[in-house]
Amino acid sequence: MLFPSMEIETTRLEKAVVVKVAGRMDAGSAPEFEKACEDCLRGGAERLVVDLSALDYISSAGLRSFLLVAKSLQEKGGKMLLCGMRGLVKEVFDMTRISSLFASYEGPESALADL
Amino acid sequence: MGALAGKLAATILPVLLFLFLLRALDSFKLLTLGRTLLAIGAGCLAAAASYLVNSAFFSALGPAADQWARFGAPPVEEALKAAYVVWLVRARRVGFMVDAAIAGFSVGAGFALIENLTYVRQLAGSPLIWALRGFGTAMMHGGTTAIFGMLSSSRAERANASGWRTFAPGSLAAIAIHTVYNLGVAPPLVSAVAALAGLPPLMGWIFLRGEDSLRKWLGDRLDKDMDLLRLISGGEFAGTNAGKYLRSLQASFRPEIVADMLCYVQLSTELSVAAKGDLLMREAGFPTPPDPQLPSKLQELRYLERSIGPAGRLAINPLLPAGARVGWEIDRLSSGLRRAGP
């Protein structure tokens, strides 16, 4: 494999589930992110804090996954918060204006404090 | 009065219901309600014009009027219905088979509405006849113009052109279907059932394929657009083939024009990315937020277009990532801005 695959780590906290994604979220790995989030939703989570500080790349497939998960959460009355957006990933979210749909924070702590 | 209302409902409701279904199937909400209504209005005008043309021929031909109804009326009516769709495709107001299909079907629905209004006053008839007009003739009018729109839009995109060749296959298909319908080779009930059973599934199939290809285009192009912007903002663009091509234009254009060309490529790509983000959000069912910077970006784009001039724009066309759809994307953003108001 040319690029390191994406790694996902979920931490269930009292207020929310923190989903930390690292590496590259592309057409091949985006479904993993969707599945991990759907598992959290099935497990009763209504708030997801997605930590993007270690995500190096995101393609349109990744953006689509974010939107699908956010829509599922919204339909259940929950919400998705993003934190740690930087560099290229931040640029992609800002350029497509998809960032305007999400509350964005420096890190998971500040996102959790706002819940 | 009640019977008249019943006749009208039987003739126009099926086609309006199918139009509503098409709009509901469009995950990307490509055609706004305003533009759908405009297309219906264009269809009404086309019907009024074809009524005048057909009436003149019917009077002039006398006993041979039947032949005009079979062979003359279909090309005239299809040409008049097609006129608005041709303008939409040429002006990049539709960008995909999906919105072209909805626009075309809307034109046909408007045409059928006026045509049936005319007949409802002139002809008596049982409810069956009027149901046939609704299910058969009206669906045929909507279907033929939708097929014309889909084929023309698809060809305009593939060939990046909008000359007569772009519209010829769609015109021929629409005229052929219409002529066969008018020939009355089958009894009216069979023709109506054939139109109802054949056209909607055919259109639905093409429509769903169009949505799939739009989804694929959206993903592929968005990634390419982002790559291009990364190269430009990272200062690596000059080393690419596209950058070398742009530099080669210095032989034909003044340096400040070449600089404006690079700005144009960057800005139109940024707008293209924003339009694709808009589509992604719509697909997921989110409302698209207004962009406060959009008016100034569009203003700057117009300035750059004037600065570069037509020859310059032609020269940098290969560098524009969305190709023929840049115009459509910018129109889409602009119309969103108009809807949002000042």
Image: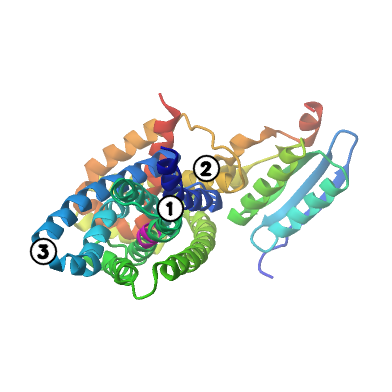
Frontmost of labels 2 and 3 is 3
Residue type indicated by callout 1: Ile
* Residue B209 x, y percent position in the rendering: 51, 65
| Residue B61 numbered mark, or none | 3
Foreground residue, B169 or B48?
Answer: B48
* Image vertical order of residue B46 relative to residue B198, above or below: above
Whether residue B321 is visible to the viewer of this picture, yes or no, is no
Q: Residues within 10 Å of mark 3 (few under 14, many from 20)?
A: few
Residue type indicated by callout 3: Leu
Foreground residue, B125 or B25?
Answer: B125
Seen at 39% across and 38% down, the residue is B335
Q: Chain of mark 3?
A: B
Cα–Cα gap, marks 1 and 3: 36 Å
- Write the start and end of the magenta stretch as one range: B140-145
Identify the image quadrant of residue A80: top right
Q: Secondary structure at mark 1?
A: helix
Cα–Cα gap, marks 2 and 3: 62 Å
Q: Quadrant of the C terminus of chain B?
A: top left
Q: Quadrant of the N terminus of chain B?
A: top left
Q: Which residue is mark 2?
A: A95
Q: Which residue is mark 1?
A: B102
| Residue B306 numbered mark, or none | none
Left or right of residue A110, residue B120 in this image: left
Q: Are marks 1 and 2 on the same chain?
A: no
